Image (spheres, rainbow, N blue to C red):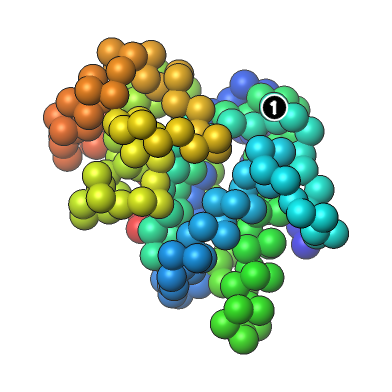
Amino acid sequence: MNYRDYKNFHIDGLFHVYNRGHNKDLIFRDDDDYRFFLSRARQLLGLQKTKGSRWICPLPPDTFSILCYCLMPNHFHLLINQKTNISVSSFIGRLCTSYSIYFNKKYNRVGSIFQDQFKAKSVDDDAYLTHLSAYIHKNPDAPYKWQFSSLLDYVEDRNDSIVEKGLILNMIGNNPLGYRNFLNDYNHEKELQICHLLFED
């Protein structure tokens, strides 16, 4: 399968990556689905052992980092730093394919679970970066209670290996309380500043 290789993917680039279910269908039906997606992402990034799976070959070390993420029932958001010349599409394409195989086998279905190819937009401004992290983390109705985003790594003591939070935290007080206050102050007016980086959910 070929994956769209966006022309603006480049070394040291930051990208907002998004995909949703075909026809807006659910892509996560229970907690184990969310956990599998995150586990597979860690395996591809070399942060978790693959337990001998012949399907998974980790990417070279330090190829990408995930600054923040949010998985929702019918879509996901990732904020990714591409650290080498290996394109983001190499990671996302393999992640979505692997997850689709798992999902179809588990629910006895066939065909694509995602709508078309994933979408990605380049983030080229520090203010955009911090605002985008707030937008991603505030996707759920009750963001502080939602387990399947990186918000709890930012505002509590959870330290998931998949999240590199230092860059964004350093821009906002460098502590969990500062980030919580920033998130609480984030509103629709500020969201309008980054509308060019967002996707329709």
- Residue depicted at 76% across the width and 54% down the height: 51
- Residue depicted at 17% across the width and 39% down the height: 188
- Residue depicted at 80% across the width and 58% down the height: 53
Which quadrant holds the C terminus? bottom left
The answer to whether one can see residue 103 in this image is: yes
Badge 1, how many Cα within 10 Å: few under 14, some, many 20+?
Answer: few
Secondary element at tag 1? loop
Is residue 104 shown left or right of residue 27? right
In this picture, is 93 found above or below 82?
below
- Residue depicted at 72% across the width and 46% down the height: 49
In this picture, is 173 found above or below 154?
above
Q: Quadrant of residue 194?
A: top left
The answer to whether one can see residue 44 in this image is: no
In this picture, is 120 found above or below 55?
above
Residue most extreme to the bottom: 108
Frontmost residue, 134 versus 15:
134
Is residue 126 shown left or right of residue 182? right
Residue 199: x %, y % from top left: 39, 50
Which quadrant holds the N terminus? bottom right
Q: Amino acid at mark 1?
A: Asp
Frontmost residue, 100 versus 41:
41
Residue 72: x %, y % from top left: 38, 58
Is residue 155 shown left or right of residue 65? left
Residue 151: x %, y % from top left: 34, 38
Is residue 70 shown left or right of residue 32? left
Frontmost residue, 198 versus 68:
68
The number of discs equals 1
In the picture of the structure, the residue carrying the numbered disc 1 is 62
Residue most extreme to the right: 54
